Image: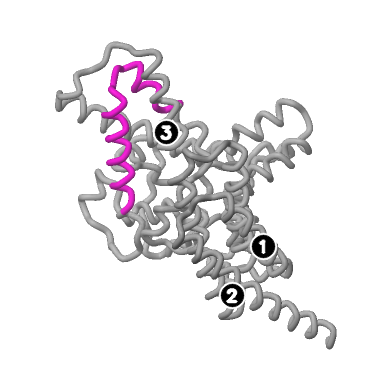
Amino acid sequence: LGFSGTIYEIIVARYQLAQLPDQALWVWISCFLLYDFAYYWKHRLGHEVALFWGSHVAHHQSEDFNLSTALRQTSIDFYGFLFYLPFFFLGFPAEILFTVVSLNLIYQFWVHTEHVPKLGPFEWVFVSPSNHRVHHGRNKIYVDKNYGGVFILWDRIFGSFQEELAEEPVAFGLRKPLNSWNPVWANVHVYWRLILDFYAMPGALNKLKLLVKRPGWRADTQQSHCKLEGMPVDLTQKFDPEISRFSQVYTAIQFTLTVALSLAVLLSAGSLNYLLLSTVVTYLFFSFFVHGSFLEGREFALTLEIVRLVFLLPFLLLLDLGPVMTALLIGNSALALPLLLIAGSKRTQSLALN
C-alpha cells in the first residue's frame, strides 16, 4: 500500500467518521467489489494520464512475461490515496480496506504468465492470464486495454476490453523500450522526459495538457504519438546487451549482497539518525545504479564499482549489522577490489595496444 495506505490511515485516525460494522459480510463483499471498481479507474488513469503513467511504467517495462513481472511494483505511487478517499467517506474501516487491497493484489499475481491458455467462460467475468497478457502487450491493438484487477467486467462495460488474438502474438514491454537494466532510471525516466518536455513546451495550457493528456502528447498535432501508425516499434527485438560471463556472475553476487544490506538497514532503520539513514539509502540507490551499469556493459561501471566498494567500508563502522553480515561484506570487498583492479589494468593495456 505504501504512501497511499499511510495517507489513508492518517485520515481515518484523525477525522473519524461513523464506520460500517466490520463483522458484517455485506460490508466485506461491497468493499471488495467497490475497490475493484476504483482500482479499474486508478489503473486506467495510470496509463492514460502522462503524470500518472510515470508512476506505473516500471510495471510494464519487462519484455518477458512471468510471475516475476507481477513483482515489478512502483516506488512512486503518489496519487493512489485519491481513490481510497471514497471508502473513508462511506465508512469502511481501514483494516477492511487494507485486507481487500491485499487480496486484490494477490489475485493479480497468478495472471502474469504465458503458460496458462484461455479459460473459456471464466474470463468473461474475471481477469485471466490471457486477457492480462493483452494488457502488457506493446502491439498497437493491445495498448491501453484490459485494466481490471479481479473482474474483467469493468473493461467490457467501459469499452477497454480486448481479447487475445491468435493471429497477433503478444509482444511484451513498452512502445518505446527502456533499453536499460538500471532500476533507478527505470523509475524516473518518464518523469525526466516530462520535465524536459514541460520546459520546452510552448504555452501554459499546453504545459498542463502535457501532464494530463495521454503519454506522448504533442502540441503541434494535439494528440499522443505513442500509437500512431508511423511510430517504429520492433515487436521482435529484446534488450539483451552482450557482456562477459564474469560481469554476469559478479553482478549477481553484488546485487544479492546489496539486497541483503538493504534488508539489514530496513530492520535497523529505527535506531539510525536521519542523516545516517539518508546517507545509507543514497548509497544503496547508487549501488543499484552501478549494478545496472555493469549489466549494460558501460565503460564507467568498473570505476564506479571500485568507488562503491571503497565507500562501503566506512558504513560498516557506523552500522550495527552483526558480525556475520559485517564479515561477509568486508570479505567481499577484500576479494572484489583486487579482481576489479586487475580487470581495469587489463582493459587499459588492451586500449593502449589498439
Q: Residue at x 61, y 76 (%)?
A: 243
Q: Which mark is residue 310?
A: 1
Q: Are marks 2 and 1 in contact (CB under 8 Å)?
A: no
- Magenta-highlighted residues: 82-109
Q: Looking at the image, how many numbered discs can be counted on the residues? A: 3
Residue 59 seen by the camera: no
Find residue 265 and report its horizontal and vertical position in percent: 49, 49
Q: Which residue is mark 3?
A: 41
Residue 267 x, y percent position in the rendering: 43, 46
Looking at the image, residue 202 sits to the left or right of residue 42; the answer is: right
Q: Residue at x 48, y 39 (%)?
A: 271
Picture layout, residue 338 above or below residue 96: below
Magenta stretch: dominant SS?
helix
The CA span between labels 1 and 3 is 47 Å
Q: Amino acid at mark 2?
A: Leu
Report the disc number at residue 335. Answer: 2
